[in-house]
Amino acid sequence: MTIIGFRCGFSTCLNMIIRYVHSRIIKIQSIQYCKNQLHTLKW
């Protein structure tokens, strides 16, 4: 395995992890936003 091949594979893997974490954060934020909206509607 070459250095260049390793770096390409590593960056691709890192991008996938970042994208996964980012989508998780967006989901958590949207869930919290919906909860807040429901909370304000109740009162």
Image: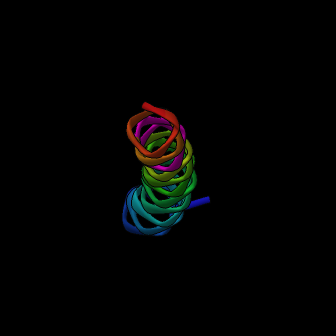
- Looking at the rendered structure, the number of numbered marks drawn on it comes to 0
38 to the left or right of 11: right
Residue nearer the viewer, 43 or 32: 43
Residue displayed at 56% across by 45% down? 31
Q: Nearer the viewer, residue 34 or 24?
A: 34
User: Most prominent secondary structure in the magenta stretch?
Assistant: helix
Which colour style is shown?
rainbow
* Residue 27 in magenta stretch: no
Q: Quadrant of the N terminus?
A: bottom right
Q: Position of residue 7 (x, y in %)?
A: 39, 57
Q: Which residue occupies the extreme front position in the image? A: 43
* Residue ID at (47%, 52%): 30
Nearer to us in this view, 3 or 27? 27
Find out whether residue 33 is within the magenta segment.
yes
Residue at the spot 57% in from the left edge and 54% down from the top edge: 20
Residue 17 image position (x, y, % from top left): 54, 48
Write down the region rendered in magenta. Answer: 32-36
Quarter where residue 3 is shown = bottom left
Q: Nearer the viewer, residue 3 or 25?
A: 25
In the picture, the quarter occupied by the C terminus is: top left
